[in-house]
Amino acid sequence: MTSLEDLTRLVPPPASPPPTDWNAIETLLGTPLPGDYKQLADTYGPGAFCNFIHLYHPHGPTEWVDLTGPMPARLRRQLVTDRNNDTYPMPHNPEDLFAIGVTDNGNHLFWITTPREEPDAWRITVNQADGHAWYTYDGNLASFLTSLLSGHTHAPVFPDDLLGNGPFFTPSPPTDNAPRPEPSPAGSTTSREAIRQWARSQGYDVPDRGRIPGHVIQAWEQAH
């Protein structure tokens, strides 16, 4: 049984996700993509796991979650800048990282694209929202999600209550008005605490730890 089969047993996919022309997508990106990701994207379509992990998808409703949009390149440029400025410790070469998802806390998921010519061997790494910590999983995206959502893997950069409501998948609404996930604005490594402080100064009620509500993140992005 494959990791994707295990994942679909754990988290049932929606009935009719949109089809994708992967030849066209890979030509546009200039790189082949891992087979497990293409099967996962075809099975689930755009959306979020546990209303927290938003995978990039060719049919993502906004640029923040569009696989072919500006975020992968923007995030790579920011990581290169952080490395060159010695801003944060970085366990991987930014040129080898390809962003594949974002969480409501501003974490980003990346493929480690080595060996470049063997996408099915690419592993997964996740950074903390403020850039200080990374978690690397020795496996592909489907196996990472299966292990994470079954509770067998704990990623320290994710909140402890990730599975508080159990594992589930929510498809993105088929409109441009879908709620945006919480990327690090413009690819920056803005501290979540800075956003919390700004939100409180504006009268928002935000928790001291855990997820920052999506409407607060959206208000912060509009203000900045």
Image (spheres, rainbow, N blue to C red):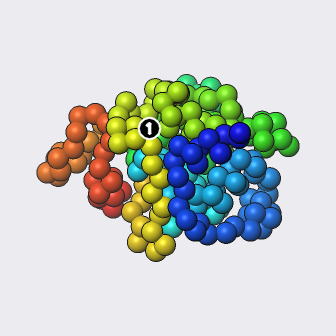
Q: Which residue is mark 1?
A: 129
How far from the left and from the top, in percent, is residue 134?
54, 28
The x and y percentages for residue 209 are: 28, 33
Please identify the residue farthest to the left as the structure is shown.
Answer: 203
Q: Secondary structure at mark 1?
A: loop
| Residue 26 shown left or right of residue 218 in the figure | right
How busy is the neighbourhood of tag 1: few (under 14 within 10 Å), some, or many (20 plus)? many
- Rendering coords of residue 152 (x, y %): 52, 27
Q: Is residue 1 visible?
A: yes
Q: Quadrant of the C terminus?
A: bottom left
Q: What residue do we see at 78% from left, 36% from top?
A: 121
In-front residue for pair 102/51: 51
- Residue located farthest toward the bottom when viewing the structure as drawn: 175
| Numbered label tally | 1
Q: Is residue 63 above or below residue 201?
A: below
Residue at 63%, 63% in the rendered image: 58
**Residue 20: x and y, percent?**
69, 67
Residue appearing at x 74%, y 59% in the figure: 29
Q: Residue at x 50, y 37 (%)?
A: 149
| Figure quadrant of residue 23 | bottom right
Residue toward you, 91 or 1: 1
> Which amino acid type is shown beneath numbered disc 1?
Ala
Q: Quadrant of the N terminus?
A: top right
| Horizontal side of residue 184 vs 96, given as left or right | left
Residue 75 seen in the figure: no
38 vs 210: above or below: below
Q: Residue 119: which quarter of the image?
A: top right
